[in-house]
Image (spheres, grey):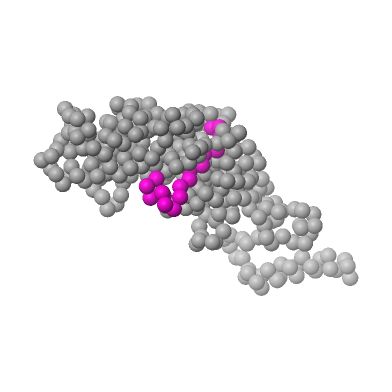
């Protein structure tokens, strides 16, 4: 009887699965977490397996349903309504990333992960102008040449389907021109907020015609975009208020310390362009590197819809394998 059970029970379980899920003729196969791990020899990031058999629980096996390690660079997309469990999955990922000694860039608008994972001894950085732990940062440190200045400007003034390209391109070029003077952020914000300061610094250049007083509607539209960004730059800390200076160029070479980008419900709208700029430039730094000898970096962007357009994100999703970057979108 026992010998017969040894053969009958597996077949009975298979018959039950067919009754419950149907018979697979072709296409994807629905399997248990343990079978998935075994067939794929999965050793990568995992998620809690809630459907383990009694034997697996006793033996402590297949606690996680794991992704194959070589597929992690194909990135992750978490989709679900509020309360659907996205944050729980991301937290599980961050715990494992920390255990593996890898680096993470975490966009944390609700500050769900920063209290648990922020570790100043590791060299972690918080990018939030209203957080006393933020280092000194200025846009002038992010550009080594004119093309990079325009890239930074494109993150601050992203394309919008409802706007004419001219009214996005001209603020970018004006911002890039002002950056050539290498002002600190508060001085730059003051220039951008006062029309006469901009006029004085573009006098004699091709940019002067774009904001000519003879075309008041065009002039006001361009300068209004600059003033929006100026409000975000105004809240950045002064250098004497911080303990160190930080920029993405230096961080990208070393890849040391996690980066947390946080906001609050009250300040999210004002800081949105700054946060989008930091994320966009960080992704650009990672994508432009070939990561020989450098560890993996995870860019974890929860609540992606709350950000401005990230111009470098599509390129990063396609080409980040060589830079050893994994992107998680929520």
In the image as oriented, which residue stretches furthest toward the bottom?
19
Residue 96 image offset from top left, x and y in percent: 63, 45
In depth, the one of 188 and 175 nearer the eye is 188
* Residue 105 falls left or right of residue 31: left
In depth, the one of 195 and 300 nearer the eye is 195
Q: Is residue 259 magenta?
A: yes
Q: Is residue 85 above or below residue 1?
A: above
At horizontal 84% and vertical 68% (from top left) the residue drawn is 5
In depth, the one of 202 and 294 nearer the eye is 202
Residue 320 image offset from top left, x and y in percent: 49, 39
> Which quadrant would the N terminus be assigned to in this image?
bottom right
Q: Is residue 4 above or below residue 213?
A: below
* Residue 57 falls left or right of residue 251: right
* Residue 96 falls left or right of residue 11: left
* Residue 49 falls left or right of residue 313: right
In the image as oriented, which residue stretches furthest toward the left?
214
At horizontal 45% and vertical 47% (from top left) the residue drawn is 263
Q: Is residue 236 above or below residue 50?
A: above
Q: Which residues are magenta?
A: 255-271
At horizontal 33% and vertical 42% (from top left) the residue drawn is 231
Q: Please say whether residue 123 is visible from this viewpoint.
A: yes
Q: Please say whether residue 327 is visible from this viewpoint.
A: no
At horizontal 36% and vertical 38% (from top left) the residue drawn is 233
Q: Is residue 303 magenta?
A: no
Residue 9 image offset from top left, x and y in percent: 79, 68
């Amino acid at each position: 009887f026992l010998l017969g059970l040894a053969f009958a029970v597996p077949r009975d379980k298979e018959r039950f699965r067919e009754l419950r899920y149907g018979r697979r003729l072709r296409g994807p196969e629905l399997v248990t977490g343990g079978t998935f791990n075994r067939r794929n020899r999965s050793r990568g990031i995992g998620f809690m397996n809630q459907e383990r058999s009694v034997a697996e629980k006793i033996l402590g096996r297949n606690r996680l349903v794991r992704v194959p390690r070589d597929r992690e660079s194909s990135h992750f997309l978490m989709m679900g309504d509020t309360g659907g469990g996205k944050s729980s999955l991301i937290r599980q990922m961050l715990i494992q990333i920390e255990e593996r000694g890898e680096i993470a860039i975490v966009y944390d608008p609700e500050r769900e992960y920063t209290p648990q994972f922020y570790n100043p001894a590791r060299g972690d950085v918080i990018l939030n102008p209203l957080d006393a732990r933020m280092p000194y940062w200025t846009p002038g440190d992010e550009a080594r040449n004119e093309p990079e200045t325009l890239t930074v400007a494109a993150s601050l003034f992203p394309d919008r389907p409802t706007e004419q390209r001219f009214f996005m391109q001209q603020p970018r070029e004006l911002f890039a021109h002002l950056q050539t003077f290498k002002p600190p952020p508060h001085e730059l914000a003051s220039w951008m907020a006062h029309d006469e300061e901009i006029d004085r610094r573009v006098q004699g250049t091709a940019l002067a015609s774009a904001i000519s007083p003879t075309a008041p509607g065009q002039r006001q539209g361009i300068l209004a975009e600059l003033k929006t960004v100026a409000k975000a730059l105004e809240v950045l800390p002064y250098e004497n208020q911080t303990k160190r200076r930080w920029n993405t160029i230096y961080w990208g070479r070393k890849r040391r310390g996690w980066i947390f980008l946080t906001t609050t419900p009250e300040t999210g709208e004002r800081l949105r362009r700054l946060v989008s700029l930091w994320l966009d430039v960080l992704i650009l730094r990672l994508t432009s590197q070939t990561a020989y000898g450098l560890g993996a970096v995870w860019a974890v962007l929860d609540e992606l819809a709350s950000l401005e357009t990230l111009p470098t994100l599509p390129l990063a999703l396609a080409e980040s394998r060589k830079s050893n970057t994994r992107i998680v979108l929520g």
